[in-house]
Image: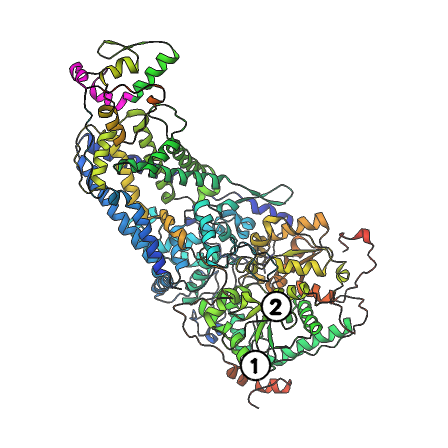
Amino acid sequence: MVDIPKPEELIKKTDTPLPSKRWENIPADLSPGKFCYPTKQKSLEYLDLPTPGREWSPADEEWPLPENWQEIIHEGFKERLEKYRSLKVFMDICVRCGACADKCHFFIGTGDPKNMPVVRAELLRSIYRNDFTTAGKILGKIAGARKLTPAVIKEWFSYFYQCTECRRCSVFCPYGIDTAEITMMARELLTLVGLNINWILEPAANCFRTGNHLGIQPHAFKEMIDFYCDDIEEVTGIRIDPSFNRKGAEILFITPSGDYFADPGIYTMMGYLLLFEHIGLDYTLSTYASEGGNFGLFTSADMVKRLNAKMYIEAKRLGVKWILGGECGHMWRVIHQYMDTLNGPADFLEAPVSPITGTKFENAASTKMVHIMEFTADLIKHDKLKIDPSRNDNKVVTFHDGCNPSRGMGLLEEPRYVIKNVCNNFYEMPENTIREQTFCCGSGAGLNTEEIMELRMRGGLPRANAVKYVHDKFGVNLLACICAIDRASLPPLMNYWVPDVGVTGVHELVGNALVMDGEIERTSDLRFEPLNDETPEGNKGEADE
Amino acid sequence: MNADYLSSLIAVVVLGLIAYAGVAMAGLNGFFGVFVPYLALVLFVIGFTRRVLGWAGSAVPFRIPTTCGQEKSLPWIKQAKIDNPSTKTGVVLRMFFEVLLFRSLFRNTRATLNENGRLSYKWVLWLWAFALMFHYCFLLVVLRHLRFFTEPVPGFVKMLEGVDGMLQIGLPVMRISGVLLLVAATLLLLRRILLPKVRYISRPADYFPLFLIIGIAGTGIFMRYFTKVDVVKIKELTMGLATFHPAMVQDGIGALFYSHLFLVSILLAYIPNSKLMHMGGVFLSPTRNLANNSRAVRHINPWNHPVKVHTYEEYEDDFREKMIEAGLPVEKE
Amino acid sequence: MNDKGMIIAGLIIFFTIFTFPIWYNHGAAAPPPEPELSQKAKAAKTCVEDTAYMRTEHMHLLNQWRNTAVRDGLREYTGKDGKTYEVSLSNTCLDCHSNKEQFCDRCHNYASVTPYCWDCHTYPKEKM
């Protein structure tokens, strides 16, 4: 592991002037700490993906490219230009106006010009021009074309794994050019020649086999949930006994595996369990479809489909009416914009209706999957929950919009509505850093891996900086989010930049505030931390850590 | 000095001089006045059509709008109907604002890091303003030029001319759009040359069209206000072009006009092979022209194909014993 | 999603607008205008400057005349050939070019030029 500089040193290094050399002439830096580890052979083999044939490191001079790698890339590119209008249009129409340049968290955090979205796209576009356009074929360099060399492949590997597919640039682009699309295509091309990263493909392989990214097997899944039920019982005195793989349940609940594997996601899981118990929901959990997230999204459209298929397969097998999905970011990009198209039509399910309020979720009528924020907001609006928000009074909360729910869906008000109902102290971050302009945690799209910690801290700088602002101004001590990747990536980010701020899922806050029938008097929150009821009124809004 | 913009500048100057010399010295009026414009027109129409049909021929496998506001969800939550449209009308409105008013550029911010290590984002509208000014002036200038291609000149053209000349400065009356086009193109160019980030990403393909348009506007303005050309004779030539009865007007037009016409021809032929195709592409961007209703209405992917999945049966085969032991229900005991 | 039809319709609309001049003129170019000289103008043989200059610069000259006469009160113009003229639209120009419709308007209409001379000056009475 490479040491990373102290925050006060690192922030100074973000404002470096642009290099005097053109980006075309700067080779990618693939020294240790600057790249993600490549996928281990066994994961690629398990998923029937092309393998490089040997273990290798991006730091190697010679990369294990197949003999006809140029042909593979060329043909793969051609195929994708026909399959994706987005790619073709985005390759053709960028005018390099520069509006996207300082919208990327990686550019803000690294100052590396190849992290400007426009240049990231040019990495691919230059090859496109060379291979597929008349101007590029005739004029070459003058038209911005360049030949596909191993150095270009290295550059792709470096920079398309320095993009978190957050789509912030696409909000500002006058043509809506979406670097996420471009990065997805580039990663597909790299995967064709056996190049990708372990932090993505190992979870994908796990998910294919065990149903979830973390490779948790069915019995362990059940044990973990039971364990959280023990904790819930200790805090609330209520024993919850959720069902698994139960046929005939009304609703199948699917959440990312991060929610039942690690702190602080597990508290969000407890929040869900308490909520469902509170309203008496007829639901079941599945060990087969035990993953909400989908690392296929960071690999290829086919892999998205392969991993996502389980949701409908399981819903059909269990005979549920519809599916409820937990708090997650890229999971919802997939469910909202890909699932029905790839694995639908889900005609064996019913258009979702809340059994508690009778609300029809018309916006999910075809996919038949509802976001838990929509579900809970509806419950609160109909006054179906008994809530004591004062139990969250020691928490001064701000909310981080996940990239995908905000820019790939538009789930903005629901989480805010829920938070405001279960907490008394809520403050927004500055407006250019929230909602559709939200900044990525810096570790999305499969980059939440230890070996690139410095890059992650740099990429997360704009987010952390905005948190620091509300921390300093309002005493915010808790960052709420609705994304499992966030729950894993924001704690180290906060720890690095704003050490006094913790991270929580929104349903953890809900779980704390819910007044359950027959519960004991709560003295601690779901983390076994004291409720701090004694906080005098006047002290509200001050950090207490 | 930077080779990228210098080479583009030189290219445009040389192109202008070629036409000037070709007419003034070699008498190639017919070549530059008739042949080249027709060739450019053909290249433009064919090239533009091919590009757009090329885009149309590519599939739109997923509905991937970039949502820039609240989705349509629960009835009591106010939806951002334009920035996150769920209906066709909403999409049409979103495209209207995008194409005609550059909605997305209007959001532009500038990020700066201050000495206390605090990032701030300032709303900056310069690019939006320059771009809007540039495109609308260009449109007005093009429409005004219809006076050379129609007889009788339609009323709307006269009206535009009237509005455009309302300041009544000089004679011939100054057309505001022409001057502003030159100003806006120059501002966009200066932006590329002076702002470090924009300079870093700019290439000949960015400078060349700007110089070309500056050249076109410049020669046009020069002809109208300074060197003067015989407008009636020019119209004879352009009407000949528009009606496919090319008239060979040999004298009296002035070679500068041929420079102007040649640069316009170059621009026309250049459009389909360049980033200027954004004029067509902006309509086809899947992150803007689709409704965000993919959970309510299923989107069809024309190439959706079966993939290998790990079925429940395979899964149960892998873990049956452990499942039974943990008390989990199984299909096959 | 099949939007090919819409895209082709868009292309057709674009090219229809783009080729407006072609179909608007029905493929026939109106003959270029031939300004008619009045008898007096014909007899004078030359205007205040030579014909080529007058064709392209008359508006500029008129503008100058307007300024010198109205603002500076100078009422004399000496042409390149040394002759002196009274600076006056009505008395000098219109004296010869008394046929506005056949002389001024023909070119102005053809080139879609709307001079604002007549905002202040009255039309000359048509006489051949």
Between circles 1 and 2, the one closer to the viewer is: 2
Between A321 and A317, the one lying in front of the other is: A321
Compared to residue A493, the image places residue B17 above or below, namely above
Compared to residue A157, the image places residue A369 above or below, namely below
Q: Circle 2 is placed at which residue position?
A: A359
Chain under callout 1 = A
- Residue B163 is situated, as x and y percent measured from the top left of the image, at 39, 32
Compared to residue A411, the image places residue B36 above or below, namely above
Instruction: Name the image quarter holding the N terminus of chain A.
Output: bottom right
- Crowd class of label 1 (few under 14; some 14 to 19; many from 20; radius 10 Å): some
Most common SS among magenta residues: helix
Question: Would you say residue C53 sits in the magenta stretch?
Answer: yes
Q: Secondary structure at mark 2?
A: loop
Res. A131 in view = no
Q: Is residue A243 left or right of residue A362?
A: right
Q: Residue at x 32, y 35 (%)?
A: B216
Between the residue at mark 1 and the residue at mark 2, the CA separation in whole angstroms equals 23 Å
Instruction: Name the image quarter holding the C terminus of chain A.
Output: bottom right
- Residue B77 is situated, as x and y percent measured from the top left of the image, at 61, 58
Q: Secondary structure at mark 1?
A: helix
- Residue B76 is situated, as x and y percent measured from the top left of the image, at 62, 59
Amino acid bearing label 1: Leu
Report the magenta residues as a range: C38-58
Looking at the image, tell me whether mark 1 or mark 2 is earlier in sequence order. 1
Q: Circle 1 is placed at which residue position?
A: A318
Between B168 and A48, the one lying in front of the other is: B168
Q: Is residue B230 left or right of residue A438?
A: left
